Image: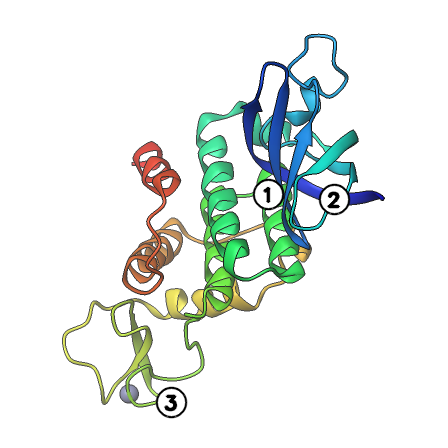
Amino acid sequence: MLKEVEGIIISDTNYGETSKIINVVTKEGIIGIIAKGAKGLKSPLRSYTQKFTYGKFYIYYKENKLSTLKSVDVINELSALKTDLILMSYLSYISDLTNQIMKQNISDELYKLYIDTLLKIDSGLNPMIMCNIFEIKALDFLGVGINLNSCSKCGISTNIITLDPDAGGYICKNCYTNERYYDDKTLKMLRMYYLVDISSISDLKISDKVVHNINNFLHTYYERYTGLYLKSKKFLETMIN
Ligand SMILES: [Zn+2]
C-alpha cells in the first residue's frame, strides 16, 4: 500500500552495498524505511535520505516491519539549522529528545511541537529560548510535567516567591528555606514558556538574565526528573559554554 507520511529523518544507516535504512519521526511515531539503492551516485533518493531531511515520504508501508521508500518531496531545507554548528547542535538535541519520547509515547501533538520549534529556530528566533520552550512542554510527555500553578511543596497558589528545580517547581513564602532566589520575571516567564503556542511566536523580547535562569532551571530539572542522558545534550552544552 503506497502511503504518504510527513516527517524528519532522525537517523540513517548503510544497509548492504547500496541501500540505506532511515528512521523517520512522524506524527504516527517512528517509521523505519529501507531506501533501496540510495547510496548509488545516480540514485534520485541519495540526497533525500540524509539525516534531518524534512519532507513528505512516499512509502510502501508495512506495519511493524521496514517500509520501502519510493520518493520524497522536501518540505523545508532547514538550511539555517544545517549550516551553523551551534544551531545544528540544537537540531540534534531536540531531535534526540523527540526520538526518546516517541519511543515510549507516540503523540501527534509532540510531533507538531517538534516541527514548530525547528521551523522557528530555522527562521532566526533565539535557539535557547525555543529549545527551552520545547523542553518545558516535552516534560508532560515524559510524565514529569512541572506544576506551574502552585507551590510544589504545600500546594497553595499564593505568595509564590521562587522556583526550585529539585523541589519540582514553585516555592511559596511559607515553605521557603534556603532555595536559590529567582526574580519575578523569571517565575512568570517560565509559565509563559509552558503556555505559549509555538507556531504563533514571531519575536522574543526576554532579557538575557531571564533566558539563562530558565535554561539553568530546566537543565537541573531534566537531570533530576527525566532519567534521560543524551550525548547530544552534553555536546550542545559544550558548544554553548
Ligand atoms: Zn508552600
CA gap between label 1 and label 2 equals 15 Å
Point out residue 74 in the picture as x, y percentages from the top left corner: 75, 31
* Front-lying residue, 206 or 174: 174
* Front-lying residue, 70 or 167: 70
Q: Is residue 1 above or below residue 40?
A: below
Answer yes or no: disc 1 within 8 Å of ligand 1: no
Say what secondary structure mark 3 lies in: loop
Point out residue 95 in the picture as x, y percentages from the top left corner: 52, 43
Say what secondary structure mark 2 lies in: strand
Labelled disc at residue 6 = 2
Point out residue 26 in the picture as x, y percentages from the top left corner: 67, 48
CA gap between label 3 and label 2 equals 45 Å
User: For the residue marked with disc 2, what is the amino acid?
Assistant: Glu
Residue drawn at (34%, 58%) of the image:
222
Point out residue 195 in the picture as x, y percentages from the top left corner: 56, 68
Residue on which disc 1 sits: 118
User: For the residue marked with disc 3, what is the amino acid?
Assistant: Thr
Residue on which disc 3 sits: 158
* Front-lying residue, 24 or 200: 24
Assess whether mark 2 and mark 3 are in contact (beta carbons under 8 angstroms).
no
CA gap between label 3 and label 1 equals 36 Å
User: For the residue marked with disc 1, what is the amino acid?
Assistant: Leu
